[in-house]
Image: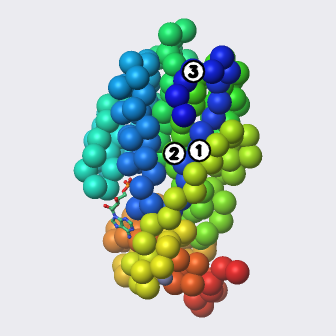
């Protein structure tokens, strides 16, 4: 998909953690640069795990990006001659991101976004479902389940080695938190102190 059309569009890359979303975003942006198109890449300020200002994949690949707090900040960085906009970790942005992606596509930009489609409970991660509905193209990637080796569609949250509870806060001070890729069968969430498997 190259930006040769008059019209813009939205591409969404989703999946659980470790499914290769950042790798795929980086691959597409590299090709945009090879085509000598102008691109701006953004990521949320809170995602500083590997680098303050780069999109970095779990395999160590990286590409230059701009960290922003609120989606509106993109407008100050995007110019008329920007052809393509890439956004990683889209699930961490304010829901206003949906309307902004639509506006950019209406302004004839190619908008490529990557992010988690489900939270650690296995529930849809707002505002990603809405973006998926509005997108022209969707790629749903799978990781490998660390328990059984099947394709993984979920992100398992472990707190001090145990499956997280449905009601656990997003930030658990003083606890050791780990995330794993798991399939539907192996994904576990504690509810009322029992392990429940969704669907
Ligand atoms: P995402 O952005 O979806 O979290 P990344 O693009 O950062 O994924 O990383 C994908 C890479 O993670 C894979 O190419 C592989 O090298 C590595 N990896 C580590 N654990 C797993 C796993 N359980 N399943 C698949 N890939 C994994
Ligand atoms: Zn499994």
- Percent from the top left, x then y, of residue 59? 28, 55
Of circles 2 and 3, the one toward us is: 3
Element at badge 1?
A: strand
Judging by the rendered image, the residue that carries numbered circle 2 is 114
In the displayed structure, 115 sits above or below 10; it is: below
- Name, please, the residue furthest toward the top: 80
Give the residue displayed 52% in from the left and 84% down from the top: 186
Q: Quadrant of residue 27?
A: top left
Q: Quadrant of residue 8?
A: top right
Colour scheme of the rendered structure: rainbow
In the displayed structure, 44 sits above or below 188; it is: above
Q: Earlier in the sequence, mark 1 or mark 3?
A: 3
Of circles 1 and 3, the one toward us is: 3
Residue toward you, 50 or 145? 145
Q: Which corner quadrant holds the C terminus?
A: bottom right
Task: Say few, some or many: other residues with alpha carbon within 10 Å of mark 2 (under 14 / 14 to 19 / 20 or more).
Answer: many
Report how far apart the C-alphas of labels 2 and 3 lie in the structure: 22 Å
Give the residue displayed 66% in from the left and 79% down from the top: 198
As drawn, is 74 to the left or to the right of 196? left
Label placed on residue 12:
1
Q: Is residue 31 visible?
A: yes
As drawn, is 9 to the left or to the right of 75? right
Which quadrant contains ligand 1? bottom left
Cβ of mark 2 under 8 Å from ligand 1: the answer is yes
Label placed on residue 4:
3
Q: Which corner quadrant holds the N terminus?
A: top right
- Percent from the top left, x then y, of residue 110? 57, 27
Question: Given contact means CB atoms under 8 Å apart, are the residues at marks 1 and 2 in contact?
Answer: yes
Q: Quadrant of residue 145?
A: bottom left
- Percent from the top left, x then y, of residue 70? 54, 31
């Amino acid at each position: 998909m190259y930006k040769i059309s008059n019209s813009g569009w939205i591409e969404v890359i989703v999946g659980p953690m470790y499914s290769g979303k950042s790798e795929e975003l980086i691959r597409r942006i590299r090709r945009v640069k090879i085509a000598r198109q102008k691109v701006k890449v953004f990521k949320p300020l809170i995602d500083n795990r590997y680098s303050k200002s780069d999109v970095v994949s779990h395999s160590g690949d990286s590409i230059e990006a701009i960290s922003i707090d609120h989606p509106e900040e993109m407008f100050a960085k995007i110019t008329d001659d920007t052809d393509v906009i890439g956004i990683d970790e889209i699930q961490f942005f304010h829901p206003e991101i949906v309307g902004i992606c639509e506006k950019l596509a209406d302004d004839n930009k190619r908008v490529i976004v990557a992010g988690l489609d489900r939270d650690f409970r296995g529930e849809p991660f707002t505002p990603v479902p809405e973006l998926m509905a509005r997108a022209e193209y969707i790629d749903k990637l799978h990781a490998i389940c660390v328990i059984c080796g099947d394709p993984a569609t979920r992100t398992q949250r472990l707190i001090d080695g145990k499956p997280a509870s449905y009601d656990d806060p997003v930030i658990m001070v003083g606890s050791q938190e780990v995330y794993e890729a798991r399939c539907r069968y192996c994904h576990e969430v504690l509810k009322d102190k029992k392990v429940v498997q969704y669907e």
